[in-house]
Image (cartoon, rainbow, N blue to C red):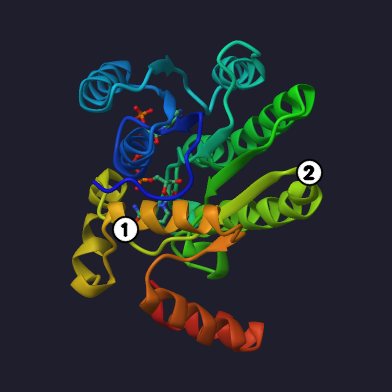
């Protein structure tokens, strides 16, 4: 793993027990950042913390919290506002998906998805911005969205909607706080090889996705941190995906909707 991007004093990464979050933690530790690792599976967080302390010498805290619950969000918000060992970079990465036509999906899963992918992202950003403002410090937020933010996906309606929410939220926050030394990024990757993609409900779809469309998590994180360094607000990793996005974004919205409705199942 290469260290890349700017050097941060301390970063809090949500969803750090697996996938992209664990990859963010490894890159940031290699860049010298102390870390606060957040997810539900404490054993995995502890294993990663041990690995990072041994390999890089940075300080690593673990914080087991369910970010789809009020208590879990409150605990992480409390850590973000703390003056002791303050956090300067928040990586809001934890997220889940669901797949299928909406009427067939479990209502409770959809509620959890909205809480985790949208509500928690707002509340964590709010707590981090309040902490930075109280300390008159500069800092940054990376909110992990998805290219789905720009696509009305028939079988991932709630997921795509939460990611569109995260992109708009991040752009608004970049406008509101950019002048105060706070960088905000919406990271919008295409398909990444992680647990999420290997989850049962995505297995079938994953089998139909051509190999060249899969992104390596290290590349996604490198492009995100390099984009943060340059102050990029919307980061789409991979030249192929950037090209695809430019072409589809130039189409009238109705044409884009019809195309996505026809080809994305
Ligand atoms: N994989 C892709 O193709 C892809 C593409 C575009 C965007 N993304 C986005 O990238 C982000 C990371 O996804 P990934 O692919 O790395 O997924 P992943 O491998 O499934 O990891 C998800 C992470 O989120 C944590 N998490 C899930 N529910 C949580 C909860 N209620 N509270 C706290 N943490 C929770 C998980 O940890 P615990 O289970 O230990 O809590 C895990 O660390 C997500 O926001 C996703 O939408 C993924």
Q: Secondary structure at mark 2?
A: helix
In the image, residue 238 above or below residue 106: below
Image coordinates for residue 166, horizontal then vertical, percent: 62, 51
In the image, residue 229 above or below residue 58: below
**Ligand 1, image quadrant it occupies:** top left
Residue at the spot of label 2: 180
Q: Is residue 2 visible?
A: yes
Image coordinates for residue 236, horizontal then vertical, percent: 47, 66
Residue at image position (46%, 32%) is 14
Q: Is residue 187 visible?
A: no
197 left or right of 233 in image: left
In the image, residue 84 above or below residue 1: above
Q: Which mark is residue 30?
A: none
Q: How dense is the environment of label 2, judged by Cα within 10 Å: few (below 14), some, or many (20 and up)?
A: some
> Of 74 and 181, which appears nearest the observer?
181
Image coordinates for residue 136, horizontal then vertical, percent: 77, 28
203 left or right of 8 in image: left
Number of numbered discs present? 2
Q: Nearer the viewer, mark 1 or mark 2?
A: 2
Q: How far apart, in angstroms, are the residues tagged by discs 1 and 2?
A: 29 Å
Image coordinates for residue 165, horizontal then vertical, percent: 65, 53
Q: Which mark is residue 219?
A: 1
Quarter residue 122 falls in: top right
Residue, far top: 84
> Of 90 and 197, which appears nearest the observer?
90
Q: How dense is the environment of label 1, judged by Cα within 10 Å: few (below 14), some, or many (20 and up)?
A: some
N-term mark: 1 or 2: 2
Residue at image position (38%, 51%) is 221
* Quadrant location of the C terminus in the rendered image: bottom left
Residue at image position (27%, 63%) is 205
Residue at image position (37%, 54%) is 222
């Amino acid at each position: 793993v290469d260290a890349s991007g700017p050097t941060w004093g301390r970063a809090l990464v949500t969803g750090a027990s697996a996938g992209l979050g664990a990859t963010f933690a490894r890159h940031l530790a290699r860049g010298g950042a102390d870390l606060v690792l957040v997810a539900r599976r404490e054993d995995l967080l502890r294993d990663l913390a041990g690995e990072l302390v041994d390999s890089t010498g940075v300080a690593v805290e673990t914080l087991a919290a369910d970010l789809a619950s009020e208590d879990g969000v409150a605990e992480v918000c409390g850590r973000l506002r703390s003056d002791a060992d303050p956090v300067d970079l928040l990586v809001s990465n934890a997220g889940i998906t669901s797949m299928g036509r909406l009427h067939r999906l479990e209502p409770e899963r959809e509620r959890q998805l909205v809480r985790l992918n949208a509500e928690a992202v707002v509340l964590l950003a709010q707590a981090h911005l309040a902490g930075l403002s109280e300390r008159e410090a500069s800092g940054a937020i990376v909110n992990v969205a998805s290219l789905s933010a720009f696509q009305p996906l028939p079988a991932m309606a709630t997921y795509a909607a939460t990611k569109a929410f995260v992109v708009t939220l991040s752009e608004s926050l970049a406008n509101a706080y950019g002048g105060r030394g706070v960088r905000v990024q919406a990271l919008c990757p295409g398909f990444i090889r992680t647990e999420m993609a290997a989850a049962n409900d995505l297995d079938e779809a994953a089998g139909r996705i051509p190999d060249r469309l899969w992104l390596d998590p290290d590349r996604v994180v490198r492009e995100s941190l390099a984009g943060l360094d340059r102050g990029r607000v919307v980061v789409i990793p991979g030249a192929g995906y950037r090209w695809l996005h430019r072409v589809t974004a130039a189409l009238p919205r109705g044409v884009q909707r019809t195309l996505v409705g026809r080809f994305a199942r």
